[in-house]
Image (tube, rainbow, N blue to C red):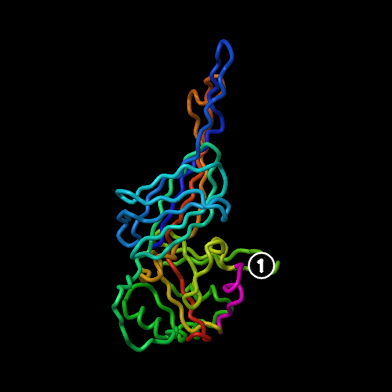
Amino acid sequence: MRSCSLLVSLCVAAAAVGVATVAPAPARAQQVLRGRILDDSTRVGVVGADVQVALDDSVLVGRVSTGAGGMFAIRLPRGGLYRLQVSSLGYRTRTSRAFPVPEGDTVDVVFSLEPDAITLPGLTVEGDRPGPRRGREVFEERRAAGEGYFVTRAQIDSLKPLEVGEILELVDGVRVSWVQKTLDDGRRQLTPEVTSKLGTGCLVYAVDDRVMRPEDRLNPWAVFPLSALRPQDIEAVEVYRHLGEAPRELRNQAWIPITQNSGRTVRGMGVDASDGLVITNRYEELTCGMIVFRTRAAW
């Protein structure tokens, strides 16, 4: 699976130091990006990975190779929005989403790479190139593997659902509730809120193996394509109630982005050595289960 977490600590109040004569200007704290690059399948550190850091998606400000345990550290010129691009032999190059680095702060990053096939010079492999796989073939193959819950067209017909979300009421281990939400086109509509009773509870959606974009995963039923699906469009449904049930090829996309804020009081961190407030912003990717809708168009 794909997993990435950022930990940002920002001191709101800093200690002031008084001097009897003229006080020297305080040393300016530098921004530091520290991190570790992991193999997505084994969770082992990737040594020798090429890490590039860009500011505002345009200016390359640092480039290093990971050392023992996949660790690296880069000093940044200033606070701002940064993005990582990481590559290594035997892995797919990956670019992170943009993340903030406050002035004078240190950000810790854990970033994973997905293994890829290695092409050897001078080695030619010939064979028939398969065409795109149809939804029925993939559905039956995954159902035969025995992991997850699978809903067929016959089951959907017997239910006679009026809304797509009703189909998920057939699935053991899943809870469906209905709430009013505003769709992308501005309409207010009852939409399902579906949670799993297993794992972390969250679910990511895909239509014919096209997974919803990360920015749409927190409100998936309000945006296309889920908002446009009708029961008669669907031939089958695959439901993986937690990450362990999902097929390997989907696990790297079974996550949602979350942000958690917390504050704590630290003695002596404020002005005149008073108590100061430290706010921590934690950016994480929460691993989830997955629901795949198989449509008639790709069946």
Q: Residue furthest top?
A: 20
Q: Residue furthest bottom?
A: 128
In which quadrant of the rendered image does the N terminus lie? bottom left
Q: Is residue 190 above or below residue 137?
A: above
What residue did someone put label 1 on? 184
Q: Alpha-carbon neighbours of circle 1 within 10 Å: few (<14), some, or many (≥20)?
A: few
Q: Is residue 289 left or right of residue 146?
A: right
Q: Position of residue 105 (x, y in %)?
A: 50, 38
Q: Is residue 115 left or right of residue 272?
A: left
Residue visible at 48% across and 80% down in the picture: 294
Q: Is residue 231 above or below residue 177?
A: below
Q: Is residue 99 left or right of residue 94?
A: right
Magenta run includes residue 45: no
Q: Position of residue 154 (x, y in %)?
A: 46, 86
Q: Nearer the viewer, residue 218 or 196?
A: 218
Q: Nearer the viewer, residue 271 or 277?
A: 271
Q: Position of residue 149 (x, y in %)?
A: 39, 74
Q: Is residue 224 left or right of residue 158?
A: right
Which kind of residue does numbered mark 1 sit on? Answer: Asp
Q: Nearer the viewer, residue 191 or 225?
A: 225
Magenta run includes residue 230: yes
Q: Is residue 127 above or below residue 287?
A: below
Q: How many numbered marks are there? A: 1
Q: Residue furthest right?
A: 186
- Under circle 1, the secondary element is loop
Q: Position of residue 163 (x, y in %)?
A: 58, 76
Residue visible at 40% across and 67% down in the picture: 241
Q: Is residue 278 above or below residue 210?
A: above
Highlighted range, magenta: 222-232
